[in-house]
Amino acid sequence: ALRFHYQLPQFEAVITQITQQDILPNSGHVRIPSDVARVVLAEKTAHGHLQVEFLTGGGFPVKHSGYLYVETGVLEPGSFMAKRWPYTREIKPKWLRFWD
């Protein structure tokens, strides 16, 4: 949790950049160039809500972890990220921790 709070300003700066882009609802996910995480993916859900994945951890065997920004505060059922990350926990409003 300490790492998240340390990186939060960087994550929020990425969110600000993404909101200035024109991502169409339900158009799939978009990879965002960034050095704050191994991978940053963004999607606008079918209802037009922004969800952003920050993949920060990975290892062998396949184990992944990171953070999700969810504009509504709830991971939208049926969305790309809800299918990709079934295990999440809220760490602060609009932010979830994910793992597999």
Image: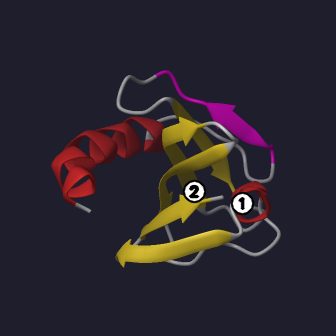
Q: Is residue 78 above or below residue 7?
A: below
**In magenta stretch: residue 3:** no
26 left or right of 3?
right
The quadrant of the image that shows the C terminus is bottom right
Whole-angstrom CA distance, mark 1 to mark 2, is 7 Å
> Sequence order check: which comes first, mark 1 or mark 2?
1
Q: Where is residue 59 in the image (x, y as percent from the top left)?
A: 57, 37
- The front one of 72 and 91 is 91
What residue is rendered at 37% in x and 38% in y?
14
Answer with left or right where residue 77 lies relative to residue 89.
Answer: right
Where's residue 25, x and y in %?
74, 52
Residue at x 42% of width, y 33% of height:
37
Apparent side of residue 32 relative to residue 100 in the rendered image (left or right): left
| 97 vs 59, nearest the viewer | 59
Q: What residue type is labelled 2?
A: Gln
The amino acid sitting under disc 1 is Thr
Where does the magenta region start and end? 27-33
Residue 8 in percent (x, y) is at 24, 51
Q: Residue 51: which numbered mark, if any? A: 2
Q: Quadrant of residue 76?
A: bottom right
**Is 10 left, or right, of 15 in this rendering?**
left
Helix, strand or loop at disc 2?
Answer: strand
Residue contact between numbered discs 1 and 2, judged by CB atoms under 8 Å:
yes
Q: Which of 93 and 66 is in front in this view?
A: 66
Task: Kindly identify which residue carries mark 1.
Answer: 45
